[in-house]
């Protein structure tokens, strides 16, 4: 499962338009998708007619209660079309930052909430508000990828520096290595300014700039006024074609990301600050790795003992209780490892002993005597 936050503190850059239409195009391609409207203005909710049905609980109440009780995503979501649900926003979200000001773990409320429904979706998109406040921090903490829509104006370029500073701050505090994608929006290829902005982005953000460009198209605004994504309002339009291409590009990145993660972890040096090593009794040097994940489709254990390779020899087997297990014979020594669950890297929740690498990444640690 992939979680992408769509973020830009500047309004009018196509952020919500992208959230609406990218989520709809992912769903049309067969991907189970959830759109979270985290903006108190609720424009994504309006743009998909998501307020037509009442939910059992609103997003604000869920984020307030998640630290004290289990909250099911089903109590918050509204079905929009096949494979697409939305968690609608309400104006009450505007008060959440003040309400959480003295709360513990206030930056991770959305992350904790989305964990409850992570097995039901392949993609979760978060439409963050056009500011860099607590709601946006929650979006960044909950996601592993960031999509930044940039319109063709000099103001958008200037705002990118501030946005990257906030992302860096969140990365330092959470150890999340966000993959950042920049999307050029409201693009008019026939104008000099659009070409200049594109050239600037290619020069300074070449590795992060997506190939897809969202062209100016009146059908995008018209579709939102009818509470529809453009692919359902006017299939044969530049807006529909561009967002379909964007969805295809985002899906194609998934394979590249998995390969990147495997190589990065394989090449990473183990020298780091060791908190403590997990002691395993010496019983023929057999170590049983376990992960409770009844809804998971696949679970691997990867680490220094298998060169961080995700493959057939690393897969765990699920029992009737939904617990995944694998027995690995290890010679004496200390080993860093992680679980790879449905495409997401996780530390071992059963093992309190961890290591923090020089790059700030947290891995679990097992020691065999």
Image (tube, grey):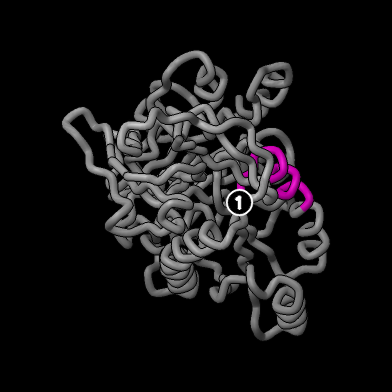
Q: Is residue 166 magenta?
A: yes
Question: Regarding mark 1 in the picture, which secondary structure is present there?
Answer: loop
- Residue 67 placed where, x, y %? 53, 18
Residue stretch in magenta: 165-177
Image-based side of 214 in relation to 173, left or right = left
Prevalent SS, magenta region? helix
- Residue 238 placed where, x, y %? 48, 75
Residue closest to the far top: 68
Question: Which image quadrant: the C terminus?
Answer: top left
User: Is residue 14 visible to the viewer in this orientation of the structure?
Assistant: no
Q: Does the magenta stretch include residue 223?
A: no
Quadrant housing residue 293: top left
Q: Name the residue under label 1.
A: 270
- Residue 168 placed where, x, y %? 74, 49
Image-based side of 39 in relation to 52, left or right = right
Quadrant housing residue 160: bottom right
Work out whether residue 332 or residue 314 is closer to the camera in this orientation and state it.
332
Work out whether residue 25 or residue 227 is closer to the camera in this orientation and state it.
25
Residue 106, relative to residue 129: is it above or below?
above
Q: Which residue is drawn at 64% across and 61% down?
A: 149
């Amino acid at each position: 499962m992939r979680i992408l936050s769509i973020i830009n503190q500047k309004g009018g850059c196509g952020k919500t338009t992208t959230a609406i239409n990218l989520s709809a195009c992912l769903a049309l391609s067969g991907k189970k998708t959830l759109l979270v409207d985290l903006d108190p203005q609720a424009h994504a909710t309006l743009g998909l007619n998501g307020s037509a049905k009442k939910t059992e609980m609103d997003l604000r109440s869920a984020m307030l209660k998640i630290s004290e009780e289990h909250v099911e995503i089903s109590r918050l979501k509204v079905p929009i079309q096949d494979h697409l649900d939305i968690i609608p926003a309400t104006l009450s979200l505007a008060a959440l930052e003040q309400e959480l000001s003295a709360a513990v773990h206030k930056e991770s409320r959305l992350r904790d909430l989305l964990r409850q429904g992570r097995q039901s979706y392949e993609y979760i998109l978060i439409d963050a508000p056009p500011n860099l406040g607590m709601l946006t921090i929650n979006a960044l903490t909950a996601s592993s990828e960031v999509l930044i829509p940039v319109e063709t104006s000099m103001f958008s370029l200037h705002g990118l520096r501030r946005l990257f500073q906030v992302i860096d701050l969140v990365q330092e505090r959470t150890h999340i290595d966000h993959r950042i994608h920049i999307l050029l929006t409201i693009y008019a290829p026939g104008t000099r300014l659009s070409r200049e902005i594109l050239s600037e982005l290619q020069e300074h953000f070449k590795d992060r700039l997506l190939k897809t460009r969202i062209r100016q198209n009146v059908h995008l605004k018209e579709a939102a006024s009818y509470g529809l994504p453009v692919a359902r309002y006017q299939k044969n339009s530049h807006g529909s074609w561009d967002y379909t291409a964007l969805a295809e590009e985002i899906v194609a990145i998934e394979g590249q990301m998995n390969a990147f993660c495997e190589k990065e972890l394989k090449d990473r040096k183990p020298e780091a600050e060791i908190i403590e090593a997990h002691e395993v009794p010496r019983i023929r040097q057999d170590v049983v790795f376990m992960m409770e994940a009844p809804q998971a489709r696949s679970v691997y254990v990867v680490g220094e003992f298998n060169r961080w390779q995700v493959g057939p020899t690393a897969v765990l087997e699920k029992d009737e209780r939904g617990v995944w297990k694998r027995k690995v014979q290890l010679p004496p020594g200390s080993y860093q490892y992680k679980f790879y669950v449905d495409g997401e890297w996780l530390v071992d929740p059963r093992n309190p002993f961890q290591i923090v690498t020089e790059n700030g990444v947290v891995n679990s640690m097992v020691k065999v005597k």
